[in-house]
Amino acid sequence: MLKLYKTTGSVLHYHEAWLEEDQIVEHWGKVGDRGESKEHPLPEDFDEDEILDKVLAPAIADGFAPFDDEDMKVLLVEYAVTG
């Protein structure tokens, strides 16, 4: 799976793609919304990284990029469980 992000104004958008059985699923939208998706046929002879880069090339050209791990925030949720 390859996840890309882009901020437009104060809105964070995502664009991602992954392999699922015999197809590539491309999914995009605003973070927090369901978004849209499109399915692409998977070529018989493929390299996973290469095909994901190809599907996401228009998004990359539009300024989408992966988050650096150092830019990620951690949210830890703890609650008591009985039993």
Image (spheres, rainbow, N blue to C red):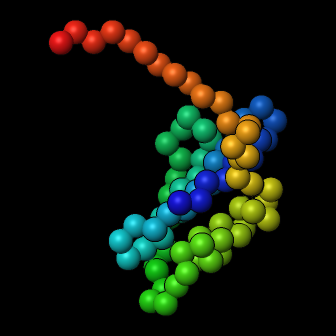
- Residue 4, how many percent across, how many down? 67, 53
Q: Quadrant of residue 30?
A: top right
Going by the picture, which residue comes out furthest to the left? 83
Q: In terms of depth relative to the viewer, which is nearer, 62 or 74?
A: 74
User: Do we see residue 55 in this rendering?
Assistant: no
Is residue 59 in view?
Answer: yes
Number of on-image labels: 0
Q: Residue at x 40, y 67 (%)?
A: 20
The residue depicted at 46 percent of the width and 79 percent of the height is 41
Q: Position of residue 23 (x, y in %)?
A: 42, 74
Residue 33 position, x and y percent, is: 54, 38
Q: Residue at x 48, y 86 (%)?
A: 43
Vertical side of 73 occupied by 47: above or below: below
* Residue 10 image position (x, y, % from top left): 77, 31
Between 33 and 65, the one nearer to me in the picture: 65
Q: Residue furthest bottom?
A: 45
Look at the image and tell me in which quarter the C terminus lies. Answer: top left
The image quarter containing residue 3 is bottom right
Residue 73 against residue 68 in the figure, above or below = above
